[in-house]
Amino acid sequence: MKRLFLILILAALAIGANAQINELSRSTPEEQGVPSRALINLFDSLHMMPGTDIHSMIVMRHGKVVGEFYPAPFAPEYQHTQYSSSKTLVSLAVGMAIDENRLRLTDRVATFFPESLPCSISTNLASMTLHDLLTMQSGIKPDWSMRAKVTNWVETFLAKPVVNKPGEVFAYDSMVTYMISAIVQKATGKTVLEYLKEKMFAPMNITRVNWEISPEGINTGGWGLHIQSESLAKVGQMWLDGGVWNGEQIVSKEWIELMGTRHANGGDHGYGYQVWMCRYPGAVRADGALGQYVIVVPEKDVVIVLTEASFTNGKPQRGLIWDQFLPALADGPLPASKDYELLREKQAAYTLELPAGKASAGIEKKIVGKKIVIPGKNIPVANYTWKEVSFEKAGKQLLMHIVMDDGSTYTQELKNKAWGISEIAGYPPYSLNPIGWKKGLEGPFYAGGSYGWEKNTLNTSLHYVNWVTSIHISWKFNAAGDAVTLSITNNLAKNKVVEVECKVE
């Protein structure tokens, strides 16, 4: 028990040191013309949506947070993987550099990288501008595998055939945003993250933010931002307010308007400067894989932040916002509602699905205190493997001692019908595999763990709470207790079941 207590204390201290929350003003929904019932319906619908794990949602109206929920084990203090919603912050950095006369939309891409140009420069490459990159109209066919094969990303990108005239054909490509990040670094002498920290994050008191760094020492741009949800809500509110935060013009109103203007025919409703147009009139969004959103709705004076792990393509989630939530808003304050207390109760009680089973079972005697050896390629979870696992009983908790393939070890607390939070060793599983992707990302990282015994099966679930990954593992023991079959699913593999036979020693 002393060991468990120490684990909990250390985790709480580390997480608390990373907290930067509750800085935005809060309000009852009705004071801002938002029915509490509309928020309850939205939160319940999202939380119960098949194929989706909601990690956080913040709803702001008139500059105040009116609703938010973080299904356990997720919590406000955790940073979250952003994938392509990172692109919109690169665009904000470009806008600030243009405001400072460091960049122009008409700047030719080739002029920034004379040392990286091919021997023969095509007419299309020579004519490619910053505007063409911002609108995903570079003329280069996307190569999503490039970042996992070579380390000289700028040179490799510039060497590719420019098959279409720049500015004419939309082709969504994260490496295009990487090139924008490289241009900002050339123009300012700072990485995109350094530049944003100085010009935007510091005046907005956003300090808990990291960004992946390429093998060339450039922020990856098109992905890799790691940030808290409330910080994203601050960015969204500044965006909604025309680039102003607390009376200070962070980025010009002109740039905010240009970002949100349709410049290309991407997606269903058009593409701006690293920003997607939406079905709802005037609404724009930052949009990342697995459902990472910052949604700005000027007509309703609304900002919504959503982080999740979803394979629905996002249309059902956004449809709930466009078709049910936004139409329910009033133009002025509403009378106080008893639904508000229910909303508060629900916001505090949401939890992701817990493993089935009891806190104890006879079969545990055959496994607790023994070692499970995982053969071959270990647990095959996107860039992540375990070598050995053992379990220790600690009251109603289980301590899962994990040896990873590189020899590092850590202990994961598992609770029954609840979540235990533990610091993991190294980095969580990742769906991307760029060379050197861990550079720029700072730990520690944490996982929430839960368990349940069912007959001869131990069910366990892990959610990497300051990341995006979840793993669900069923440990099925045979009657003799000398072997176990692991049935593994993880959200990065769209919950495909993988079985691994292991030996119990």
Image (cartoon, grey):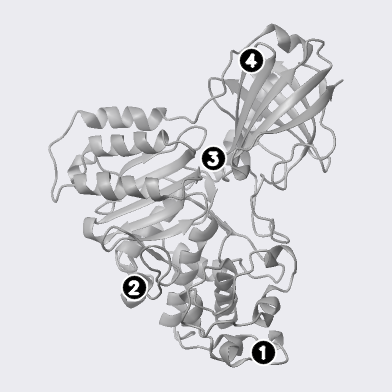
Q: Which residue is mark 2?
A: 261
Q: Could you tell me how far apart the alpha carbons at marks 4 and 3 are, in whole angstroms?
A: 32 Å
Q: Amino acid at mark 3?
A: Gly
Q: Nearer the N terminus, badge 4 or badge 1?
A: 1
Q: Nearer the N terminus, badge 2 or badge 3?
A: 3
Q: Amino acid at mark 2?
A: Thr
Q: Amino acid at mark 1?
A: Pro
Q: Position of residue 61 (x, y in %)?
A: 26, 51
| Labels 1 & 2 near each other (Cβ < 8 A) | no
Residue located at (73% from left, 60% from top): 436
Q: Could you tell me how far apart the alpha carbons at marks 1 and 2 are, in whole angstroms?
A: 32 Å
Label 4: how many Cα within 10 Å (few below 14, some 14–19, many 20+): many
Q: Which residue is mark 1?
A: 114
Q: Which mark is residue 16?
A: 3
Q: Could you tell me how far apart the alpha carbons at marks 2 and 4 are, in whole angstroms?
A: 54 Å
Q: Is residue 94 visible?
A: yes
Q: Could you tell me how far apart the alpha carbons at marks 1 and 3 are, in whole angstroms?
A: 46 Å
Q: Which residue is mark 4?
A: 453
